[in-house]
Amino acid sequence: MKIIKHLDCESFLAHNEELLVQNESFYNLMLGLAYGIRSKNFETNNPLFYSITDGQKIISCALRSKVYQFIYRFRKSYFYFYF
């Protein structure tokens, strides 16, 4: 497994949008936040974007939209981390 940090939302969506759209009901929160950040509809403070891969396959992704909230979606659960 490998974690890839993206420098911006465009790179994050370029790598993950297909996964997010194919599983929209599962990733709807993350997809909406990513689109909002890309279109500058949300104020963010240094958002973070990640892809999680297994070999060449993207298996999940994560983003931090506000200073202390980190959202990671895997299988059937959202995980919120505050730091």
Image (cartoon, rainbow, N blue to C red):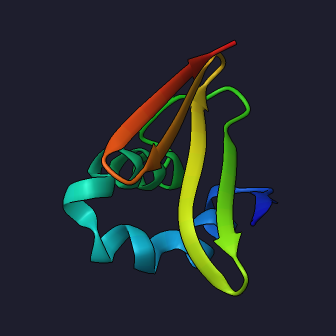
| Image quarter in which the N terminus is found | bottom right
Q: Position of residue 9 (x, y in %)?
A: 62, 57
- Quadrant of res 65: top right
| Image quarter in which the C terminus is found | top right
Q: Which residue is depicted at the point 28% across and 69% down?
A: 23
Q: Answer left or right for 15 relative to 23.
A: right
Q: Position of residue 24 (x, y in %)?
A: 25, 64
Q: Which residue is depicted at the point 38% across and 55% down?
A: 31
Q: Answer left or right for 75 relative to 12.
A: left
Q: Which residue is depicted at the point 53% across and 28% down?
A: 43
Front residue of this view, candidates 73 and 38: 73
Q: Which residue is depicted at the point 41% across and 48% down?
A: 30
- Outermost residue on the bottom side: it is 56
- Quadrant of res 64: top right
Above or below 42: residue 27? below
Q: Answer left or right for 78 relative to 71.
A: left
Above or below 49: residue 58? below
Q: Answer left or right for 20 relative to 3.
A: left
Above or below 17: residue 81? above
